[in-house]
């Protein structure tokens, strides 16, 4: 793939950049990344802060230029470049920039929408869905630690992680700040929180 991208860069830099965008989001989807890393990639690839708001699931996130993601439900400038999560829907994704979008920005928004739909479908739509096969799912961990998420969504996330409803959990933060879900797999120096019930809202 790198050889192909290098050749494309020599012939058409924009085409090479487009291939890198596709590869990056494919990597995130295949790795079951959560909404945070997906939005972070959008900000870094476009050089503009990125926003994602989905009122159905109390999702309101913003990634800054360095890719840092925080909860942010502030006002949206209607002049920003936006895109819906689903074709024909209302805008739910924005790049905090005024003007016409470039080809790369349009592609990033399209890939973010696809990746975010996959995450929300897997981790938030709890009604009538069976438990998936992933016991090590970063996106499910993200939902489990998200206090504004509904109880049904957090229970669904727990089932994805094969956690019993009555379990007590501890939040473990690695020294490098990286998110990991594997149990004690090369975590190194860590900070360990108290044991709390699964659905306690301040688990994070």
Image (tube, rainbow, N blue to C red):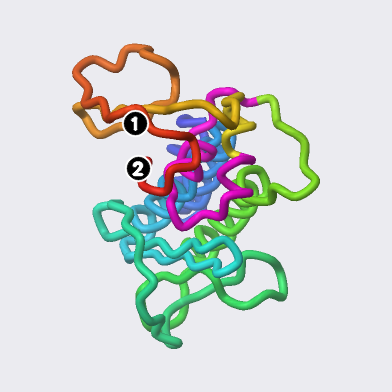
Residue indicated by mark 2:
204
Task: Provide residue 197's location: percent of width, then percent of height.
Answer: 45, 34
Q: Is residue 24 visible?
A: no
Q: Is residue 154 magenta?
A: yes
| CB contact under 8 Å: marks 2 and 1 | yes
Please tell me the numbered disc located at residue 125: none
Give the extent of the magenta segment. 134-156
Q: Is residue 152 visible?
A: yes
Asked whether 3 or 155 is in front, the reply is 155
Please say if 93 is above or below 15.
Answer: below
Category of crowding for the residue at label 1, using alpha-carbon neighbours closer than 10 angstroms: few (below 14), some (14–19), many (at least 20): few
Asked whether 189 or 107 is in front, the reply is 189
Residue drawn 61% across the image and 71% down it: 84
* Residue furthest bottom in the image: 78
Category of crowding for the residue at label 2, using alpha-carbon neighbours closer than 10 angstroms: few (below 14), some (14–19), many (at least 20): few
Q: Is residue 186 magenta?
A: no
Residue 150 found in image quarter: bottom right
Residue indicated by mark 1:
171
Residue 79 found in image quarter: bottom left
Q: CA distance from mark 2 to mark 1?
A: 7 Å
């Amino acid at each position: 793939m790198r050889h192909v991208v290098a050749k494309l860069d020599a012939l058409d830099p924009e085409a090479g950049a487009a291939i890198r965008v596709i590869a990056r989001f494919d990597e995130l989807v295949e790795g079951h990344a959560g909404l945070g890393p997906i939005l972070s990639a959008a900000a870094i690839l476009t050089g503009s802060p990125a926003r994602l708001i989905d009122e159905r699931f109390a999702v309101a996130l913003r990634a800054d230029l360095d890719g840092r993601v925080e909860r942010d439900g502030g006002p949206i400038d209607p002049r920003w470049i936006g895109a819906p999560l689903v074709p024909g829907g209302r805008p739910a994704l924005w790049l905090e920039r005024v003007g016409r979008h470039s080809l790369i920005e349009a592609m990033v928004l399209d890939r973010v929408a696809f990746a975010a739909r996959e995450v929300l479908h897997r981790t938030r739509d709890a009604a009538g869905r069976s438990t998936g096969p992933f016991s090590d799912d970063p996106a499910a961990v993200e939902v489990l630690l998200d206090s504004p998420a509904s109880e049904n969504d957090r229970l669904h996330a727990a089932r994805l992680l094969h956690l019993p409803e009555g379990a007590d959990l501890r939040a473990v933060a690695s020294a490098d700040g990286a998110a990991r879900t594997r149990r004690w797999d090369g975590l190194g120096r860590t900070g360990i929180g108290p044991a709390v019930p699964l659905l306690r809202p301040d688990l994070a």
